[in-house]
Amino acid sequence: MKKRQLMISIITGMAFAAAIVLSSPLRAASQDDRYIAIDKGKVSASAMKASDFAPAGWSIENQTEGDVNGDGSSDIVITLTQDKAAEGKSRARALVVATAQKDKSWKNAAVARYLLDCVDCGNAMGELSVTIKKGVIVVDQAEGNSGSSMSRETYQFRFDQTTGRFLLIGADFLNGGGPDNMTSESDNYLTGQRKTTVMKKKDPTSWSKFDVTKNYLDTFDREKIETAAFMRIGK
């Protein structure tokens, strides 16, 4: 009898967790199920112009310039879009960071396969913005179907001189609908400080600590981080 009750409790808990995820504007399926990510091996190691970093079947959607590695030269961050999706899939996106070289060429410094939403994954309220602010690469994207059902996430990556890679230093999440029914979370990946704001509470802001893990742009899988975040703030 006790084993049967334990099994029922486990199943109920799993169903409740699944319901939370499915009730939010987040994807119900994994990223791998929605699109086919870019093949890093087909992105040029170096190029003389930005368009050369777009392999066959891909095009530049947007690019922004700024010094991202602190050497005083202007680098480029490129958003690539798949020209045609595979059958039953959505068109994928990818992010390429190219740093300026002394010979006027560009070096492929990082390719992010699982950072950006696919083209139609954001639904009616889908938005994507990639900017460079004070040397930090900022990726901001939103999903949702209406003003009462939306989510937003922002990731910040900064060049790490020790590893020569772009390290995640901050992540922000917003979930809900309407100014009085929003919950947000801001995670500092340098200090491990987490700020949570629930607008409908009398005392909306609370602080907590979390275990910091190192996440780099070139191997970043945002699904793991965002799912955990929206499980916390999407209840």
Image (spheres, rainbow, N blue to C red):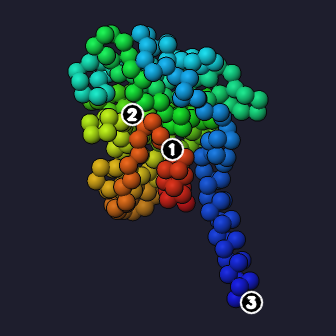
Residue positioned 64% across, 70% down in the render: 13
Neighbor class of circle 1 (other Cα within 10 Å; few <14, some 14-19, many 20+) is some
The answer for how far apart the CA atoms under marks 3 and 1 are is: 41 Å
Please tell me which of labels 3 and 1 falls first in the chain: 3
Which residue is at the far right? 87
Which residue is label 3 attached to?
1
Q: Which label lies toward us, 2 or 1?
A: 1
Quadrant where the image shows the C terminus:
bottom right
Q: Which residue is mark 1?
A: 222
Q: Identify residue type, mark 2.
A: Val
Q: Earlier in the sequence, mark 2 or mark 1?
A: 2
Density class for disc 2 (Cα within 10 Å; few <14, some 14-19, many ≥20) is: some
Residue 39 at x, y percent in the picture? 58, 29
Amino acid marked by disc 1: Arg
Q: How many marks?
A: 3
Where residue 209 appears, as percent x and y from the top left, is 34, 61
Q: Is residue 19 above or below residue 34?
A: below
Q: Can residue 177 be seen?
A: no
Where is residue 168? Give x, y as percent.
Answer: 37, 42
User: Is residue 86 visible from the viewing direction of this image?
Assistant: yes
Task: State the SS at label 3.
Answer: loop
Q: Secondary structure at mark 2?
A: strand
- Number of other residues with Cα within 10 Å of mark 3, as a class: few under 14, some 14 to 19, many 20 or more: few
Q: Quadrant of residue 118?
A: top right
Q: Nearer the viewer, residue 93 or 49?
A: 49
The amino acid sitting under disc 3 is Met
Q: Residue at x 67, y 46 (%)?
A: 29
For label 2, the residue is: 138
24 sits left or right of 163 in the view: right
